Image: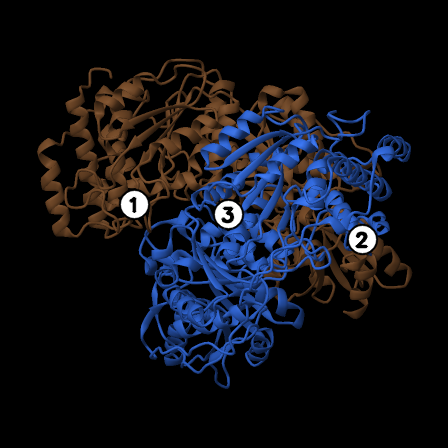
Chain colours: A brown, B blue
Amino acid sequence: MNDIDIEQLKGIANQLRIHSIAATTAAGSGHPTSCCSAADVVAALFFGHMRFDPKNPHYYNNDRFVLSKGHAAPLLYAAWGETGLFPVDDLLKLRQLGSDLEGHPTPRLPFADVATGSLGQGLGVGVGMALCARLDKLDYRTYVLMGDGECAEGAVWEAASLAGINKLNNLVAIVDVNRLGQSQETAFGHDLNVYKERFEAFGWRTEEIDGHDLEEIAEVLAAVGLGEQPLVILAKTLKGAGISFIQDKDGWHGKPLSKEESVRAIAELQPSAKSGIGQHIPAPTQLPAPKNEAPASYPATTYKMGDLVATREAFGNALLRIGTADSRVVALDGDTKNSTFSEKFFKKFPERFCECFIAEQNMVGVATGYSTRGKVPFASTFACFLTRAYDQIRVAGISMANIKLAGSHVGVSIGEDGPSQMGLEDLAMMRAVVGSTVLYPSDAVCAEKLMDEMTRHKGICFLRTSRPKTPVLYNNDESFPIGGAKVLRQAANDKVTVVAAGVTLYEALKAADALKAAGTGITVIDAYSIKPLGRDVILAAAQKTNNLVLTVEDHYSEGGLGDAVAGELSSEGIRVSKLAVRELPHSGKAEELMARYGIDSNAIINKVKSL
Amino acid sequence: MNDIDIEQLKGIANQLRIHSIAATTAAGSGHPTSCCSAADVVAALFFGHMRFDPKNPHYYNNDRFVLSKGHAAPLLYAAWGETGLFPVDDLLKLRQLGSDLEGHPTPRLPFADVATGSLGQGLGVGVGMALCARLDKLDYRTYVLMGDGECAEGAVWEAASLAGINKLNNLVAIVDVNRLGQSQETAFGHDLNVYKERFEAFGWRTEEIDGHDLEEIAEVLAAVGLGEQPLVILAKTLKGAGISFIQDKDGWHGKPLSKEESVRAIAELQPSAKSGIGQHIPAPTQLPAPKNEAPASYPATTYKMGDLVATREAFGNALLRIGTADSRVVALDGDTKNSTFSEKFFKKFPERFCECFIAEQNMVGVATGYSTRGKVPFASTFACFLTRAYDQIRVAGISMANIKLAGSHVGVSIGEDGPSQMGLEDLAMMRAVVGSTVLYPSDAVCAEKLMDEMTRHKGICFLRTSRPKTPVLYNNDESFPIGGAKVLRQAANDKVTVVAAGVTLYEALKAADALKAAGTGITVIDAYSIKPLGRDVILAAAQKTNNLVLTVEDHYSEGGLGDAVAGELSSEGIRVSKLAVRELPHSGKAEELMARYGIDSNAIINKVKSL
């Protein structure tokens, strides 16, 4: 334990408890008892075991620490305060608008790689970090501190399974088994054996300890990294440990101590508290830095106008093309790689591919983990199955994670597989993610160029791709900036501006031809950038067509392209009508379904006539 | 096995294989090999073991069968065809628009209680059914047929855990371990022991069998219901079993046989195939029918105008009030019952309450299971954590399930806990669910009345509730029909119609007072029904205010109230401007955050002035 003796660690642990109690009482809210149960483990990890540069939390070979039980944020903040990263007096600004010491950690803080607080997500992120250490030939370890309550989340077992399969012996989970959930005792109380059997069945080495016995903690930490398996330390603890009148009592979740209670608690802890030993933290090993630079450019695409290529296949082509030039690119899939075409990348770069099996939540968590280490992860599956990971995607947004999602098989145009396989809510879902970019190419060139844009853009991006083959519409030198839109048909005296993307763009073009033949002109716009929307292009076109816009989308009518256009242009006096899927679709042929649900060229023609 | 001998079952199994092959070849798509691996198990379950009335698939004491591996739909259809429910010739209409024998099962079919096809969801539904059998004192059993690949989904382990905790010995899972996933071999191949250890660690009794040996199958089925634990049968099978030139080969997922291949395959199977023995199916036990009738009315509410009551607490009050009058009501929560106030119901009706612990996916799955049995389940947690269950909610929409969701702690107005706990995308998410109803009360009376409406309405409903206490605005005799809206302030010469809901409604009322004092009138509308929107009320008001509408919402600007109003009214020439949260929020006091993110009364006043 690097010159730190056990008595000193006990002192630090109590100091962390004092900080946690004082900060939450000052804030008037928070989870002091959830901090106290884990204080001894955190003291042992931060002050003598983990190898990191406390002045540079982002250093590439620092051991990583993920506080999956994010509500114990004050404990995390106290630990970093005690390393000397910032003045410990700042801890009393907890939860204030002017301080980044928020109620739950976010990466606004340099030592929080990801936002936590939605339980059960930390382990998946940790798996991504641990896989990345291996890829980058670094020896940092990843520690994930979890609560016992959150082990009810399936995402934990998705992550545990993948860690076991990949024999991630550089990954250490610690479960703070304090017995008490928010509203009652957990299902298993202090029965560590349940957790032990589960983790062992998922391929882990397990250690059971008294989480308040620093000698036991130090002993199991000394054996971290032994063997081939990931390690979970099951720590039996008491919620509120160290506060005699509160510890192990139900009804104390998410509740600060009153001023009087905090004085009493701190008086109990103060005599044995110790501070200021950040200088004893072991330094990380010096190893070559990973090469995480973007190339100056990506190779060009070589499609021919009119070639039939599904945008999902163009995604696969782009992943391989970009990944060949850019070593930051990693890819993940959920056992759909032969349908999403990510297998093209997998075959060439198996070491940069993570098969996540059918576990989409974990796929997004692992991608987030990779992104925190400087990689550009592309995670793909059917768009509808990304709904499975919506909470992980939401939290990736809060984490400002640089992840890229590709959802294939969207809309009724997938045809015979039926509604359970149709992505019809993905635009609504992805638009509502904070900071997200939502892209929807119609042809292969656009799909490839948007992949270039996604790789260059920092932040969470979503590419919506289609199952059917569609003709190439654009030249290889066309550019598709995020936030743009393309005017494909426009003439003086056009009556309506039709805004479409994906399969419906081809329907709009068909409708334009038919209407033109019948003497009615319409402007047709390819809205390949849904968020940010190509607002100015659409607005300018609309103003030339009597302020009339018709949107057509292979998506439900709520929250998709139509709402995006109406939401942005209605205030400008543009009248937006929508064609979209408005009922539960059936299995059938793609063209039959597009007709039945009113998003094909005939539906457009009829609607234009009625406008 | 009720007079059915093993040879007969072998014959039926091969007949089911023949149907599955013929139907998918006729359709030109589908998953025949995934049918063949499970054909022996399904034959044994349907023709001699399960107790059900094949002429009345909905009969309340029938054993339930959930095909969690929904892509084996042709096998399910073949089994029901062979029971005599419909002519087996119909099987050749598989995947056609004119037939309800869709690519994956939906409840358009009388024998599919839920839609399946998004993997890993069947077991949670089965847990709900099994819990319901216990509640209704019925002896039907629930059988869930799963694939091995889908056992990677965390939702499976959430369900397995809850089944183990509740000792559901009326629940039987069968895992068809055919080794091969969609794009490659699963992580564990034919190593049944991995699954055995996992299920045992989660509290299950396990049996390992050769899934093509009907004697072994019959033997383990004969012991169903023994002991206190749920039972999982781990069946080692071959994908494509029975087709000599395909079985156990990779690359055959989701692929029909060519016409020639199907002829060859059927020629192999035909000699031992048998049909038409539906009459040997054991009848269900005769037991009293559960009382699942709605009462004529619900008790009245008794709030006083001006009382301060959070809508989340009103939800809890309503749950208890309605649940006291209506025995169909059951409640579920994810260890947040003391925050969502569902604990009021839990304390009075523990037997109708399911604590799902921190596992929201399973909570929604279990709720769906209850709903298939005639109950009206209310599942509650923080709105942001419902994102965890978005795929389950999406599939509940496809299942036309009668479930009720309540999401509390929405928006920046929760304050100090920070962004990971703020529901800011729930309206977008819930609006995009097919057939959903989305409600957002501002005061306690409205929340309670909307709970009455939700209980009466058949279909998936979402109630969005707030953390802060807000004054009661309405009399107890006010009614709030779904699809309505309330005009709270209106005068001649009003300049703008402000549409708000929840905490922002109070800000709009404040703004109206301040603007009135300054000589500017605004119309204020309570848009308590977001989907369907109170369109006509808003449109009529807007037309009296120069077609100007301003929406204000404690939600991200995408897919919420503003987009709903713009999406519906823009085509009528209404100009809709939006105030909404447009960046990643921070921790802080509720009022500080509402000011900072531009959704408080000052923001409304400034925006109204600028319009």
Extreme residue in the bottom direction: B492
- Mark 1 neighbour class, 10 Å CA radius: few under 14, some 14 to 19, many 20 or more: some
Quarter of the picture holding the C terminus of chain A? bottom right
Q: Answer whether residue B544 is visible to the viewer in this image.
A: yes
Q: In the rendered structure, which amino acid carries the disc numbered 2?
A: Glu
Residue on which the image places disc 1: A99
Which residue is tagged 2? A507
Q: Earlier in the sequence, mark 1 or mark 2?
A: 1
Task: Tell me if residue B492 comes above or below residue A264 in the rendering.
Answer: below
Instruction: Give how far apart the Cα atoms at labels 3 and 2 are.
Output: 40 Å
Q: Which residue is mark 3?
A: B362
Residue A307: give x, y in percent of width and height.
84, 36
Q: Is residue A450 above or below residue B536?
A: above
Q: Subunit of mark 2?
A: A
Q: Nearer the viewer, mark 1 or mark 2?
A: 2
Q: Is residue B42 left or right of residue A459?
A: right
Mark 1–mark 3 distance (CA, rounded to whole Å): 37 Å
The answer to whether residue A475 is visible is: no
Mark 1 element type: loop
